[in-house]
Image (spheres, rainbow, N blue to C red):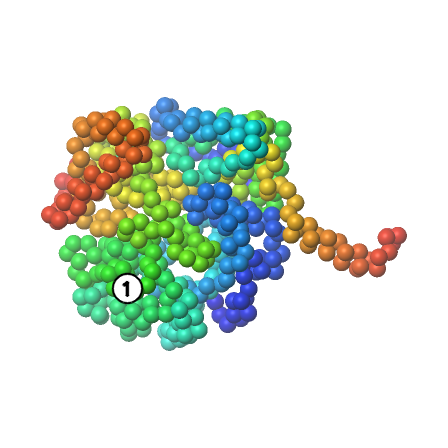
Amino acid sequence: MSDRKNTAQADLTLGEVLRKRGISRRSFLKFCAATASMMAMPPSMVPAIAAALEKARRPSVIWLSFQECTGCTESLTRSHSTTIESLIFDHISLDYHHTLQAAAGTHAEAARIASMEENFGKYLLIVDGSIPMGNPGYSTIAGVSNHDMLMETAKGAAAVIAVGTCAAYGGIPHADPNPTGAVSVGDLIKDKPIINVPGCPPIPVVITGVLTHFLTFGELPELDHIGRPMAFYGKSIHDRCYRRPFYDKGLFAETFDDEGAKKGWCLYKLGCKGPTTYNACATTKWNDGTSFPIEAGHPCLGCSEPDFWDGGGFYKALSMPTENITQNIIYAAAGAAAAGVAVGALNRAKKSKAQATHQKVKLEDLNK
Amino acid sequence: MKQSIVSPQFNIQVENVMTWNVKPLLHEIRHSLNRLIETGESSVIDLRSIPLAPGEEEKILTALGRGELRAELDALGKSEIIETQYAGVWLISHYNENEEIIGRFIEVTVMPDILCSQSADMIDASQRLAEALQDTGGNNEGG
Ligand code: SF4
């Protein structure tokens, strides 16, 4: 958490801060290589990243938490590459984060106001949690409704990062029947650049990767049609899933304990949402790169997609007829990745149809 | 510091046929090596960017093996730089101070950049050496 003693550092570039700390150029190169990897950028970008990071100045960050479970903050603070992240986080000035800051009550609010005034037009606003529009009293901070605090704080922000599926698309609070009238950040803020970093929670290095991108290049990364950074959300789980050869051969686990499950076959029939889900889990993985849900034998829930909670049942197969899969793959002769995109697009269309008819999760779905 | 270049793998049942990424990657390395020989162009592959099944990274590392040279770097945590049994193909593993892996790269090059002394560090070193000599009063006879 920043305090005034850090303001002296505010004018230094990251390169200067590192040199002052006696960090060698060689260490800096190692730092840049790991950072490029963290930002999902090709290693050929390392010199450009080094040049940009060298000159990067310390941004001020205000973090607002609305209707959320704190899972996103938990994820971020368990980010595994502690050395690299601590360098980045020592470099940003996290002026307000009500879970992490020491100050409370009026002091905390004073810190937020002070930071907004000092850095007007320049600070980065990070939001986790959705915003209830049903009744302002559903969620308040220091007596201020989430809506009012968001609108007030967004005014002077350079950009807004919506961390987690709740902030990005409404998430679980927005699930049918949406009792609080939850909306996403993008539903309310229309005049600022918004980066959506969805996931329930997002992968820790994806959160830090996006922050680092902003810190490094001072601009937003390339985004997809629903505001997600292409570097992390550009490919579907299915495109990069190591079980994909089984899918292509039509070899599926039918239950969680059959022969197919034991042999590591595709989890499509157990409800895997990998084909319609865009995220970095299959390559970046979780828990220090250990594994990801599919590797642990569980289908992907699709948590980085809008309305994943209302997708018609976690254990219900996506509605594509499986007997035609091999056929479709053969037609899409452009190669496995292209076929994945095609299947993904087809399933996306079916999924929105399922959403339109508001299918709910039934007990039989779970017992399938 | 992890002693082995092979990361521990969890016991997840996978059929032995799961090698779809190993061969293409080894082919890519061979092409890169030819490029290095013919044009002098180096290449880097970030292992984190490739979707690997449990055990596949291990297979790649085993296939590459260890060559004649191994260097250890102590900078923001350890790094291990080894030349594989194929000259010009290097494996670089970066760890943080908690000994967790933060990046693993295959570099196809004559000499990985990270091993070279950096000019900024050399300028700094020359200054420090000058200061150290001043501290001893420039008397190189002193004990
Ligand atoms: S359906 Fe799921 S388990 Fe099967 S290949 Fe696609 S992402 Fe992997």
* Residue A134 picture location, percent across and down: 18, 66
Whether residue A78 is visible, yes or no, is no
What is the chain letter for disc 1? A
**Position of A175 relative to A65 (above/below):** above
- State the residue at coordinates (34%, 64%): A64
- State the residue at coordinates (41%, 36%): B50
Asked whether A312 or A125 is in front, the reply is: A125
Residue A179, located in which quarter of the rendered image? bottom left
Q: How many labels were placed on the picture?
A: 1
Judge from the rendering whether residue A184 lies leftward or rightward of residue A39; answer left or right: left
Q: Residue furthest left?
A: A357
* Residue A184 picture location, percent across and down: 25, 59
Q: SS class of the residue under badge 1?
A: loop
**Residue neighbourhood size for the residue with mark 1, other residues' Cα within 10 Å, grouped as few (<14), some (14–19), many (≥20):** some
- State the residue at coordinates (55%, 35%): B41
Q: What residue is disc 1 on?
A: A189
- What amino acid is found at the position of numbered circle 1 in the picture? Ile
Judge from the rendering whether residue A129 lies leftward or rightward of residue A23; answer left or right: left
**Position of A172 relative to A239 (above/below):** below
Q: Which residue lies furthest to the front in this view?
A: B39
Asked whether A344 or A274 is in front, the reply is: A344
Asked whether A17 or A131 is in front, the reply is: A17
Q: Is label 1 within 8 A of ligand 1 (CB to nearest ligand atom)?
A: no
* Residue B46 picture location, percent across and down: 47, 39
* Residue A368 picture location, percent across and down: 17, 36
Judge from the rendering whether residue A194 lies leftward or rightward of residue B62; answer left or right: left
